[in-house]
Image: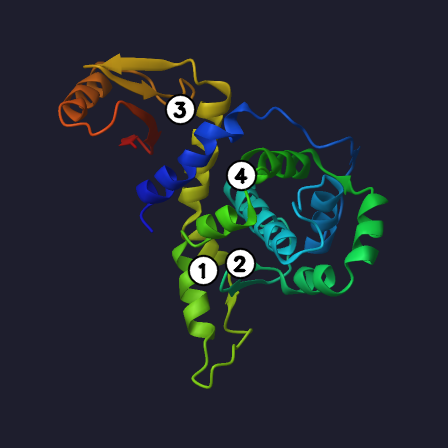
Amino acid sequence: MPIKTFLRKIIDFFRNECYTNDERVDSIHMGGGQMLTALDYAKYFIRQGLDTNPNTYDGNMKLQKLLFFANLISIAKRGEPLFDDPIMAFANGCVVESVRLKYKNNYQDLLKESRSFEPSLTQEEYDILNLTSEIFGHLSAKELSNLNHGFDFWKSAYNRSQCSDGFKDKEQSIISNAEMQSEIEKIKSVIEQYKILKNERAFKEIVNGVVFYYSPENISMTDDIFEQLYAFSQNADEDVYNIYSDNGKLVIY
C-alpha cells in the first residue's frame, strides 16, 4: 500500500480520537538490562487494560497488533526491534504465536501474571510503550487489523505461507526484521503526523482557502513551500490537509 494511502487511512482515526488522548501508562520501575520478551510486553499491555474485550478473540487480536506496532515503533525510533520473538503473518495481521496461544489457552493465569508484573524498563522502552498506547490503544482490533494489512510485507509473508493442501507453513509466515525495515518510513510518518495532530495542531497555514496543518519541528514554511501549497490548492479536493517533509520532499495528504 502506498505511503500516502496508508497515512490517509490512519489519519481518519487520529482526527477523531487519538490526538486528544493524554493518558499515560502507569508507574514503572526504570532500569533495563537484557531484552524482554514479547510476553513481557503483552503482560504490560494487559496490565494497562489495552486488550479491549479481554479473554475474547478480539482481545487477543488487539494485543497482537499492539505488540506488532510497538515493535515497528522501536525499529523506527532506535533502529532495533523491541523483542526477538518471531512475528508471523496470519489472516488478520501480524501475530506473536507464543503470546497468542498463551492468551487463548491460559488467559486467567496470564491475567494474574500481568497484574503482578513489574518490568524493569529503560526510558527508551517506556517511551515506545507509551507512544504505542497513545497512537493505537484506542483503536479496535478490527481497525488495527486493517492498518496492519497496509504493510506489503504482511501480504508477502502471508501468501508464501499458504500451502497447496490448504494448510499453513508457519515457518514461511515469519516476517524478518529486514522486511519490516523496508517499510519503516510508514510508521515514521505515522509518528510524525500523530505529533502534529496531538501536540501542534495550532500550527496551520491557510493558502487559497485551504488549511494546511504542520509541525514547525519538521518543516520550515519557506517561500518555496508556500508556492507548492498554492499550486496544490488550485485543484485541491478537500479543505483541510496535513503536510510534512520527508527527506526534504514536501508530502501533502
Disc sitting over residue 218 in the figure: 3
Q: Amino acid at mark 4?
A: Lys
Q: Which numbered disc, 2 or 3, marks the residue that appears first in the sequence? A: 2
Q: Residue at x 65, y 52 (%)?
A: 59
Q: Where's residue 77, x and y in %?
A: 53, 38
Does residue 155 lie above or below 132 as drawn?
below
User: Quarter-wise, where is residue 138 in the image?
Assistant: top right
Q: Which numbered disc, 4 or 1, marks the residue that appears first in the sequence? A: 4
Q: Where's residue 209, x and y in %?
A: 22, 14
Q: Residue at x 45, y 38 (%)?
A: 188
Distance (Cα) linking label 3 and label 4: 15 Å
Circles 2, 1 touching at the beta carbon (< 8 Å): yes
Residue that badge 1 annotates? 154
Residue that badge 2 annotates? 94
Residue that badge 4 annotates? 77
Q: Which numbered disc, 3 or 1, marks the residue that appears first in the sequence? A: 1
Distance (Cα) linking label 2 and label 1: 7 Å
